[in-house]
Amino acid sequence: MLELSIALPAVINGVMAGAVYALVALGLTLIYGVLHIINFAHGNLLMIALYAVFFLLTLGGVDPYAALPVMIVGAFAAGYLLYRYVIGTLSHGKDQNVLLVTLGLAIVLENLALWLWTGDTRTIQVPYGYTMIDLDIVFLPVTKVIAFVGSLAICAALWALIALTDLGKAIRAVAKERQGARLVGINVEHIFAVSYGIGIACLGAAACFLLPTYYVSPTTGDAFVIVAFTIVVLGGMGSFIGALVGGLIIGVTESLGGLFLGESLGHIGISLIFILILLFRPTGLFGAAR
Amino acid sequence: MRGPARGRWLVGALCIAAALAVPFVVRSDYLLNFLILVLLAAYLGQAWNVLGGYGGQSSFGHVVFFGTGAYASSILQTRFGVNPWLGLPAAAAAGALVGAAIGFLSFRFGLRGSYFALITLAFAEAFRIVANSVPFTGAGLGILIPLNQSAANFQFRDKPGFYYVALALVLGSLAIAWWLERARFGARLAAVRENEDAAAALGVDAFRCKLAAIALSGGMTAVGGTFYAQYFLYIDPSIAYGVGRSVEILLVAIVGGVGTVFGPLLGALALQAIGELTRAWLDAPPLSLVVYGALLMLIVGFLPNGLIGLTALGRRRRRADA
């Protein structure tokens, strides 16, 4: 029944998509791990980043992959300022308020995009858009391969940043014990904003990898929100390796779900994983015990 | 204390009398429609408040109950010819059952805080996907309720009929909140919210308390879903189970003031008024929602206790807390 020649390409496609999901989820898990908040504007910020990549190409003639450095730096700056001057200020550091402020932000961003850029679905044309790599068992578009390799590289760089640098040490300190971190002289508010900025920078990078194979519209981000939450929970909230493994699992689940259950019902695989993980192992695959 | 207490009853009676008189004074369908939507939002917000405010279990997927109620009565009506007035209690039962099932699973496994919020979100999404995929619910096409206007059919010819039903729902929900603040069950629930372990140590069965709260909240929300379906005569998976409505429901309670009797009513009035005014002033619909979102952020930023914190009711409550 399970035809290998059909299932295998689906699995490989799922893995490719999963790496980009992982990158989106990585931003979410970092923000959760450090600030202990659920960033409800995550999908909408990804959508804004996708538009940025779109306009860099259509108006500025910048190739999506060449835009990577600009997008990472720009998204980091935007995230930093957003936390410092909007989210942090309005929420007074109360978790529930952060959540509501990010909800408000999500509404603002989505409708701002709708107003400025209409509800049209936009795609880009790149010269290498139809170039294929022949892997014998499956033809892969080169854009998906770049997205896969690039996402893994960014994940690795982020891991190095958190694990090996002084800034990473400060971030880990704040994530574990913010009061203690403050006492040893770490500027906690600054670290919060930096972490938020890094989380959004992941979205900037993800947007560069996504757009050549995807599309953008004001509601594009919504599709990623539940997927990203699922990955974060599956991998364990705050866990890096968890986000990566979770992303790959979810990518494959989605791909196989679509293959066996059809376009509409196929999505239920993700929700079911989400519910089962929350019930039986809410700390996720790699999360620390609560 | 007899004086102020009697004064409060008097004010309450006057408010109810005024609310009952509204359709005799207000003739504009636009304004009545606005008030009906305020009342529906207030009712749903209060239903959320039972679990999220009094029980301290913030749900992000309350639409799972709303949609279940809307589908329950609509399916009974279109497929089995059951009168929607009979569909209403059936919807409440379905909502309570779904609530109990979700509650049983998530509370049995000890989910709290963001984990509970996320699992409700996931259930709502799973329900949306199923409703979108199986023919029983009409899949993506949704359910169109055949037009058959008569009060006996829960399809009033004009707005006042719906207004009175919505008003009755809100008064009922206020009574439930009022009861929660005085009953033993409400006290147990508050104890669980403040410190579950301490409450359990005092012999409160936290699991059963939360289960009862989510079933009650789910049943109430489902009734709101039936009302919606009868008012608009059409539902589809994204109307019934869309994430956006979950957010609207919890915003009403949080903007108004969580865990208070009048918070959701105040929140519903404020949010609907803001929505309506921005729509009227700003021609472009997306722009009005931009302003709506920005105002929401400012309300959270400057009124951390919700709008109720501005009023005498809120101040009295804060003093009682202190």
Image (cartoon, coloured by chain):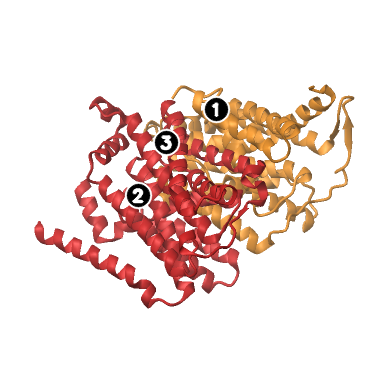
For mark 1, what is the residue?
A: A276
Residue at mark 1 to residue at mark 2: CA–CA distance? 30 Å
Q: Chain of mark 3?
A: B
Color used for chain B? red
Q: Is residue A85 above or below residue B104?
A: below
Amino acid at dot 2: Val
Q: Residues within 10 Å of mark 1 (few under 14, many from 20)?
A: some
Color used for chain A? orange
Q: Residues within 10 Å of mark 2 (few under 14, many from 20)?
A: many
Q: At x 57% / y 40%, what residue is drawn?
A: B127
Q: At x 78% / y 53%, what residue is drawn?
A: A57
For mark 2, what is the residue?
A: B258
Q: Nearer the viewer, residue B151 or A89?
A: B151
Q: Residues within 10 Å of mark 3 (few under 14, many from 20)?
A: few
Mark 3 and mark 2 lie on one chain; the one further toward the N terminus is 3
For mark 3, what is the residue?
A: B113
Identify the element where label 3 is drawn. Answer: helix
Q: At x 49% / y 50%, what residue is drawn?
A: B247
Q: Are marks 3 and 2 on the same chain?
A: yes
